[in-house]
Amino acid sequence: MEAVMDVWKDLDWSPLLISLKTGVVATFISFFMGIYAARKVVKASPVKKAILDGILTLPMVLPPTAAGFFLLLLFSRRRPLGILLYEQFDIKVVQTWLGCIIAATVISFPLMYRNARAAFEQIDVNLVYAARTLGMSETKIFWKIILPTAGPGIAAGTILTFARALGEYGATSMLAGNIPGKTGTISQKIAMVIQDGDYVTAGVWVVIVILIALCVVFFMNLILGKQMKNTKQW
Amino acid sequence: MGISIDIRKNLGNFQLEIQWKSEVSRIGILGASGCGKSMTLKSIAGIETPDEGQICVDGKFLFDSGKKVNLKPQQRRVGYLFQNYALFPHMTVEKNIAAGLKGSKAENQKRVQEMVQKFRLDGLEKQLPGQLSGGQQQRVALARIMAYEPDVILLDEPFSALDGFLKDRLQLELEEMLQDYLGIVIMVSHNRDELYRFCDELVILDKGAVVVNGDTKALFARPRYKEAAKLTGCKNFSDVRRIDAHTAELTEWGIILNLQQELPENCTSFGYRAHDFVPIWGERRENCLKVQVLSKAELPFEVQYYLQTEKQSDVNSANMQIQVKHSGIEKDSSTVENVISWFIQREQQPLLAEKGLPDYLQMVEERCMFLE
């Protein structure tokens, strides 16, 4: 117990901050991109749908390290895109916090996309037709009818996306590395201290992660519960 | 005022080919399930696009494949009442009604209030659709359409999912609500009663094509086509052979009809409604069928007899003999098809109880339908 208290007192909180920041930003990006992609795919023709769906789901099916490999190929400063970003815009991806975000976004994106798509496909198509005959523009229909009706599915997708982004390890370690105070996320911290045999510090971080996870799930269920009570399932 | 439609669309298993024109404001489309009724409505609303043709409302082309005109549903000013009402489940009654309004907040608020008053939705403004009864939902759906002031309102089988009592109430309510609406209302249904009470003109569809259209009451009296007669509820048909201008043989029923009126030349089929037979006891009179009771079904307000004519019973016994010989073959389906139905109202039943089953059923000339 004393050992735990000692670790707690001298704990470097930067991994928590980095993980949370990365999780929030990645979820934010995945949220919009996932919904946008879902909307496009739902409306696409069957063949296009199958191809798009395959590509968009790939990051979820691939081992994260394989995704990390592709990301490195893309953003390495020895590759065209990496060079372009660095020389033209002074943007570095590899070994930076931006790398953390990109890795977490790419890996968590399919969860958002797939959940949003499933939610969209369950919507009563007559609602959309009715909205059209009432003169609502397609944009308005999307934001005012489709999105709210798909609310529960989208919220569930958002939780899963955030959880995945928060815990991302494989692709992050390859693209962003584990630079303490910069790109060192909780997952990487746990892996690192375990390699050093420091089980107490690892345990403390595991408990913190569990608490965050519980908070997120509890909070989201609260919102969902409220919505479910008023929305009648059809 | 007026609507004219001339569209074609390939629906895979059949070809939709709808063509009709109407100048009245209450139109009904009658047809069996899957005959293309809903597809026709959806084409008018712009939810579905026909392969080719024209749709014109009050001189305005909503769709014209020749001129590449295809207005979006948003631009057509056509309201659509869905069978399940399609109310937005997450929006309150107020918000549902306001969904299609474009004006300023104050204007919209005023319009919503008007609709709430008119459709007797006071006190329900903040409720969600899921908390409303079926009747209230229908009123909200109509209020939402009317707030938007469409030129045409389409009713897609508005009552088919309802039970008898509620259905009756809602029909009455819908008629009241639409009474002062000046635009065109088109109602689609497979129920002839709904359409008979509601529509001035009727379009009868069968397998994706218009069989006949015209004044509702005239069509029920003289459907002209066998398919139309069937859809308006006629149950008894026989093939007919024209002998001369005033006599015809009903070949399947085995009798000769003598008529005052002149027989149309191109008729191939004869129809007679189950309610229109007159029971005769004693002497045979003109245009009488001698029948034999096959079975009887008691309904709440009438009794339905299933009958067989003399000729049919001969044929049937002949069939029976054949079947005995080839005792593997299936039962001849024509025996069921050619059964004659006779409805007798409750008030007439004492007479039947007293005198027994009639010897003959007479067909009244004015009720005879000669069909193509």
Image (spheres, rainbow, N blue to C red):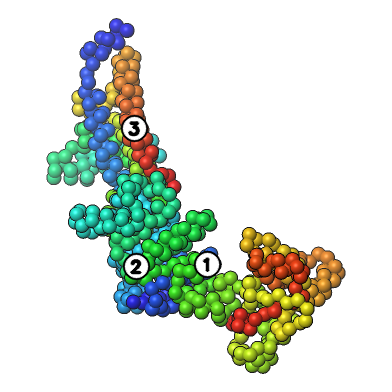
Do dots 1 and 3 share one subunit?
A: no
Q: Position of residue A30 (x, y in %)?
A: 29, 41
Q: Amino acid at mark 2?
A: Asp
The quadrant the N terminus of chain A occupies is: top left
- Asked if marks 1 and 3 touch (Cβ < 8 Å), the reply is no
Disc 1 from disc 3: Cα separation? 50 Å
Q: Circle 2 sits on which residue?
A: B180
- Asked if marks 2 and 3 touch (Cβ < 8 Å), the reply is no
Do dots 2 and 3 share one subunit?
A: no
Residue at the far bottom: name it: B244
Find residue A222 and name its label. 3
- Evaluate whether residue A8 shows in this view: yes
Q: Position of residue A18 (x, y in %)?
A: 23, 28
Q: Circle 1 sits on which residue?
A: B193
Residue B17 against residue B140 in the figure, above or below: below
**Residue occupying image coordinates x 55% and y 80%:** B222
Q: Position of residue A119 (x, y in %)?
A: 39, 46
Which image quadrant is residue B42 in? bottom left
Do dots 2 and 1 share one subunit?
A: yes
Residue B142 against residue B89 in the figure, above or below: below
- Evaluate whether residue A64 shows in this view: no
Q: Amino acid at mark 3?
A: Leu
Q: Earlier in the sequence, mark 2 or mark 1?
A: 2
Horizontal side of B231 relative to B102 (left or right) equals right
